[in-house]
Amino acid sequence: MPLVHMGDMLRHAYQHKYAIGAFDVVSLDFISGVIAAAEEKQAPVIISLAESHFEYFDFELLMAAVERAARRTWLPVAIHLDHGETLESAVRAINLGCTGVMVDASNLPLQENISRTRSVVDMAHACGIPVEGELGYVPGVEGEDAERHPGNVVYTTVGEAQAYLDATGIDFLAVSVGTVHGRMKGEPKLDFERLNEINRVLQIPLVIHGGTGLSDEQYRRLIDNGVTKINYYTALSDAAGRRMKDNGSNHAATGYTDIAKGIAGAIRQQTARCIELWGSAGKATELLEYCRPCRQVDHVILYNVDGLDTEGVNSMMQEGQRVLSAIPGVREVVTGHAVQHDASYRHCWLVRFADRAVIKSYKEHADHQRFANERFRPYAGGRVSIDFE
Ligand code: 13P
């Protein structure tokens, strides 16, 4: 069960002064390459899925593969929503299996950023999920040329960072200290004094976006000053692109599999280099002992109904699936009828929660209460239930 609590992961990195790579994935090759590198280096890893990339893949389908990859490796892994813009994005990500979420409202005025972030923190913490917020502005778009997105860096200020942390309760802060998303010419100038001061005052794990293109020395100084998560995508994307171009220049390569050959290996090489550079190599075993595992809870109800015919039961179940599966922290809702005619209970629900914390937040959620009080309990007199891990 190597999916672990991301808050524990980054706290360990913060205390021991190293950084964990948060690698954005856009395909199965990216997932395989990142996991292979982490296995080679015996390192913890964060697999990120950026909302701005959802036009290139089906988030739900790729999440299923990411989760399977995370559960079958022995490494400590976290799955993170990168640059989620809204509360709805965060709910969707948690319900699909993300174990950490970022809310990026950094383009809004401070008070609006605070209130958007606060709403995500309230929801996510009630589901046992940690939240990354961002303050200041890191320009550019991951995977693209920085010149095409020329917005100016807005630096994070210490005073605003403290106010933002106090007002929102975020777990990690993405800071803007001079990095840029995407490809840029030359080495960016980073404001280490500012970072040092933010770290001294906040004392929480800090995050760097725009991790591509920094020097070894810059990475080292970022980590020395509280950075524990480095977001990285453009260099992976470029390595994959180069491999495809090389494959394509061979005239015998005409089909998809010819062109796509070796992408996972190229991603693996880049990822392994970062892991080594950022100090997370060899940390997997120690972290597995330190971190709480992410455990889902199954809420099961067996029941009989009184006063509803088969059609009525089916329509109640359908409504329940729709309403309950939209509640934050609900991974899945399954309904069914007993196969045996003489079963003591004729029907069942299985509601899968992302975490133990959801037992409470689900019970108290207005949609659950309304459904349970109006559509379920009046008819389901005889029932037993259990929550199990
Ligand atoms: P790069 O585009 O510099 O790799 O940064 C990626 C990133 O910050 C994703 O959030």
Image (cartoon, rainbow, N blue to C red):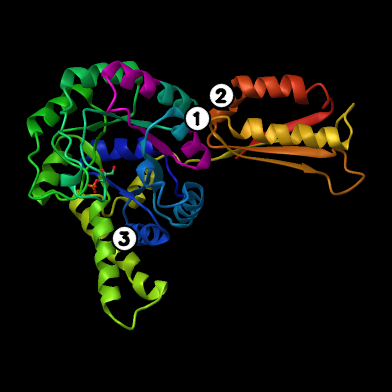
Report the Cα–Cα distance between label 1 and label 2.
7 Å
- In the rendered image, residue 186, in percent from the top left (x then y), is placed at 7, 50
Which image quadrant is residue 387 in?
top right
Residue at 38% across / 54% down in the picture? 26
Question: Who comes first in sequence, dot 1 or dot 3?
Answer: 3
Instruction: Answer left or right for 322 relative to 223.
Output: right
Instruction: Write down the residue under mark 2.
Output: 361
State yes or no: discs 1 and 2 in contact (Cβ < 8 Å). Answer: yes
Residue at the spot x=55%, y=32% of the render?
Answer: 356
Question: How many residues crowd around disc 1 within 10 Å: few (fewer than 14), some, or many (20 or more)?
Answer: many
The residue nearer to you, when weighing 201 against 51, is 51
Q: Which mark is residue 82?
A: none
- Crowd rating for badge 2 (residues with CA inside 10 Å; few <14, some 14–19, many 20+): some
Secondary structure under tag 2 reads helix
Q: Which residues are magenta?
A: 91-118
In percent of the image, x 24 and y 39: which residue is there? 228
State the residue in front, 221 or 176. Answer: 176
Residue 37's tag is 3
